[in-house]
Image (tube, grey):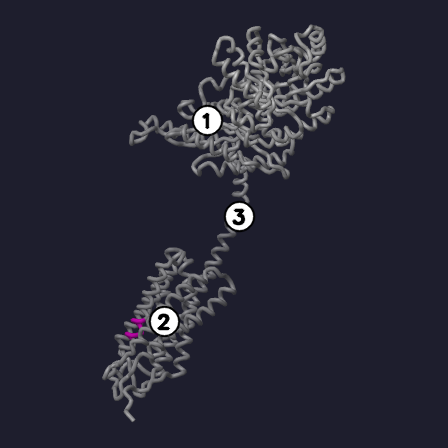
Amino acid sequence: MAPALFLDTRHDPLLVGVAFLVAAFASYVTLDLARRVHTAAPGARRRWWAGGSLAMGTGVWAMHFVGMLGFDAGMPLGYRAGPTLLSWAAAVGAAAVALGLATRDRLGPVALGGGSTSMAVAICVMHYLGMAALEIAPGIVWRPAIVLLSVAIAWGASAAALGILFALRRHRGVRRLQLQALAALVMGGAIGGMHFTAMAAAQIPAGALCLSTDGLSGQPLAAIVAGAALLLLGGALLLSIIDALGSAREAQLAHSLQRANVDLREANDALLRRAFEDPLTGLPNRALFNDRLQHAVARIARGTSQGGPPNGGPAERLAVLFVDLDGFKPINDSFGHEAGDEVLREVGRRLLATVRDSDTLARLGGDEFVAMIESRDAAAAALSLAQRLIDSLRRPLRIAGQEVALSCSIGVAVYPDHDDGGQRLLACADAAMYAAKRAGGGTCALYEPGMGGDAAEQVLLQQALRGAVERGELMLYYQPKVDARHGQVRGLEALLRWRHPERGIVSPAVFVPLAERFGLIGAIGAWVIDQACAQLARWHAQGLRCRVAINLSPYQLRQADLPARIRTALERHQLHPSQLVCEITETAMMENMHAERSVLDQIAALGVCLSIDDFGTGYSSLAHLRNIPARQIKIDRSFVVDLAGSADAHAVLEAVVRLAHALRMEVVAEGVETDEQRDALVRLGCDLLQGYRIARPMPADAVPQWFEARQERPLPQAGAAGEGSFQTVIAIPR
């Protein structure tokens, strides 16, 4: 049998157990120190890092050295002091890397890879320097595969330790202590596993001698090293606990001191919110907006006085956008104020989500909002923002289980272009907003000189207009329509009048735009619907069988309950839907081809006839005429006025009449004032004529007498369609 090439080696079981105990305790203390390093103040953090690195490194090294002292090769062994001291320094270095990474808020892949590699190198240096302190002749023979395995274990243990350091931060209390103890056992086992794997890689040749037997050795030394390490680690843990308790007491004291001022701060905050925050939407209120506006104007004014921007580019400007909801009052009236408040809150959320963080958005009150932006191209930026705000509010809202369409009108004014003092900028934006409302709403207008008008006069008028319906100051006058070919009376158009107690008759051209501006048109329109149906019922009771047409404004078309209101009025006055015609302007009809088309379809489904008013003044596509539910076209008077002297007007009218008849639609011409116009319209084939040439507007009680007088006159022909009846048209003038 061949002699053995290497000596049989083993480990002292007692010292192996002591080594694992030291490793586990060192791991537990390390986890606690890592938490203290992370939570300590910047100045104390460096001290905890230095002391923790010393305690942790010493604990890890003690496990390694006790394990080597328990190594038995069958001959006396000793370890040189120099390499042993260097191995201790390497262990402290590995601990310094680990605790240094513990100060981070998060452990990224780069930090994890670099930190675990550095720790593994330091641990391997610690171990193999410690083994180098053992002088053997001939020297130790290493197994390369097991050496590489020990390096891999060192790297894996280091990565796992770093991961555990950060994972335990998520836990508090008893749960953290339990997990920390379990993690300490895992880390201790990993560190010990690396050490004893590396020891297994060492082979001592048979017949070798130890030349360092006079060095460090023996179980007593192992006991001293283990005891000293445990005392050092225990002292570090005790200091950590004491510091944590002290920090907790300081935090409790600071919390108590803070609580003494909480009520005062909360009261101050509540006062500030009350003073500068809208309680309904949480947005800034008028006071805060005015303050920010004044500061912005002053800042821009200073920049302008100092010569503008340093690069010579355009000067900074400021734009104010005045946002007013279209048709909000009917929502309040129909669904109640609680639903109206929820609508305003949702509007505030949508507007806030649309503006930039640098812009200022505020609620002035009611359904009025305002935004302020600063830009070198403020006008263009404001108009772009205005369109985004309009688009945002066009999305339907759900109220009481119903979808309600909403829109807004926006006015824009720019400083210093429209108000070089900055004091009337909000008023200029307000005036531009009303110009947008007069244009039909749902749009934006940029301020122009002259938009403001007499603001005080307008305020007085709108205040008086609010009670005009209740005081009975509104009335309807009627203007006849006749058959173009035979002259029979086919209808009457009723014109809205306001008899002011002091001003007398106020022109509809004055008060209707006011009603639209201040959200009164919905209530007035509802009054007209009911008044027209009531008058029609009275005429029926007198034996006058007729139809009535009601002109609907664009604001009414945005009310989802409009078809229900019309149906209710017809039922209340016992009228058949076929006796009602609703006139919608060409512009409103085309705008509502998609947005409020369902409202028009519902009205048509009732059996009510729809008519296109002011045809030729809008932007309709003739191809769309066959797709809309209208059955009548009313040609605008501007074409009739130009008919006698304009070949173009004659050609346009001829084409419209032909197209309307091809689509089985009736054609009405308004503004007929001369015999020449009447004759030309008859030749073109118009169905109905209206204008001063036929009759002037008259009160409702004069209609039966005028009709009787008209019936007594001989007609050119008889038997025409519609003979023996007449049509009453009731319109809100624009």
Main secondary structure found in the magenta portion: helix
Q: Residues within 10 Å of mark 3 (few under 14, many from 20)?
A: few
Q: Is residue 509 left or right of residue 646?
A: right
Which of these two is toward me, 564 or 686?
686
Up-down: is 258 above or below 613? below
Q: Residues within 10 Å of mark 2 (few under 14, many from 20)?
A: many
The number of numbered badges drawn on the structure is: 3
Q: Which mark is residue 153?
A: 2
Q: Is residue 622 left or right of residue 163?
A: right
Give the residue type at disc 1: Val
Q: Secondary structure at mark 1?
A: strand
Give the residue type at disc 3: Ala
Q: Which residue is mark 3?
A: 260
Residue 126, magenta (yes or no): yes
Q: Residue at x 67, y 27 (%)?
A: 607
Q: Secondary structure at mark 2?
A: helix
Q: Residues within 10 Å of mark 1 (few under 14, many from 20)?
A: many
Gap between marks 3 and 2 measured at Cα: 55 Å
Up-down: is 486 above or below 332? above
Q: Which mark is residue 182?
A: none
Q: Which mark is residue 412?
A: 1
Q: Is residue 642 left or right of residue 99?
A: right
Q: Is residue 298 left or right of residue 203?
A: right
Q: Position of residue 127 (x, y in %)?
A: 31, 74
Task: Look at the image and tell me in which quarter the C terminus lies.
Answer: top right
Q: Position of residue 452 (x, y in %)?
A: 49, 19
